[in-house]
Amino acid sequence: MRGALRSTFGIALIAGAILAAPSRAEEARHSTPATYASLHGARAPARIDFGGRWRVQRIDGVRVPSGLLVTIEFGAPGHVSGRSGCNRFTGPYTLTPTSLSFGNLAATRMACAGRGMEVEARFFKAIGRVDGFARSRRGAVLLKSGKRTVLLLRRG
């Protein structure tokens, strides 16, 4: 009788732990990119700590002109903000072990002189196509659309 009671208690304890554990989808919604990539790095295509500010150096292979600031900052879980060459932007992102995508981004609407508006248009077009990520051999982060790199980022 005692053995059966211990077995039943053990099974109930294990079942309770399983039911109380968060699902992978719930973990993804509540994790920062840094946490998610580090927790699930073995299944990710690259171990990347996305947390913090990144400077965009290339958009669709074209270097961002000096003097223009294009950044992406991964802040609170699921929230991104930054500068797009002319304006500031904010919005949602989704990160899984094998993909990264951005939702509808809101931006301020200031007009800029020079190449700022052109770079900004190319940036928003590129970030809207992002569906994955990788790390280059030189340490840059590559935001991908399929197999094509659309944004090249470095810390800072």
Image: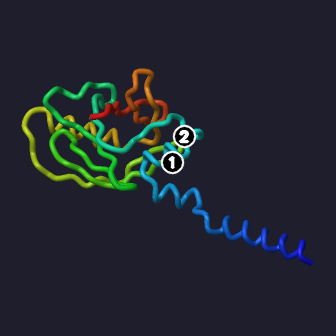
- Amino acid bearing label 1: Thr
Kind of element beneath mark 1:
loop
Q: Residues within 10 Å of mark 1 (few under 14, many from 20)?
A: some
Indicate the secondary structure of the residue bearing disc 2: loop
Residue name at image x 28 percent, y 25 percent:
62
Q: Which residue is mark 1?
A: 96
| Residue 99 image offset from top left, x and y in percent | 49, 43
As drawn, the residue found furthest toward the left would be 113
Q: Which corner quadrant of the image does residue 111 belong to?
A: top left
- Looking at the image, residue 103 lies above or below residue 155: below
Query: Residue 41's mark?
Result: 2
Image location (x, y in percent) of residue 53: 29, 41
Location of residue 123 in the rendering, given as x and y in whole percent from the top left corner:
27, 38
Mark 2–mark 1 Cα distance, whole angstroms, equals 10 Å
* Dot 2 and dot 1 residues touching (CB under 8 Å): no
Farthest residue, direction top? 138
Total tally of numbered discs in the picture = 2
Residue at x 53%, y 42% (from the top left corner): 98
Q: Mark 2: which amino acid? A: Gly
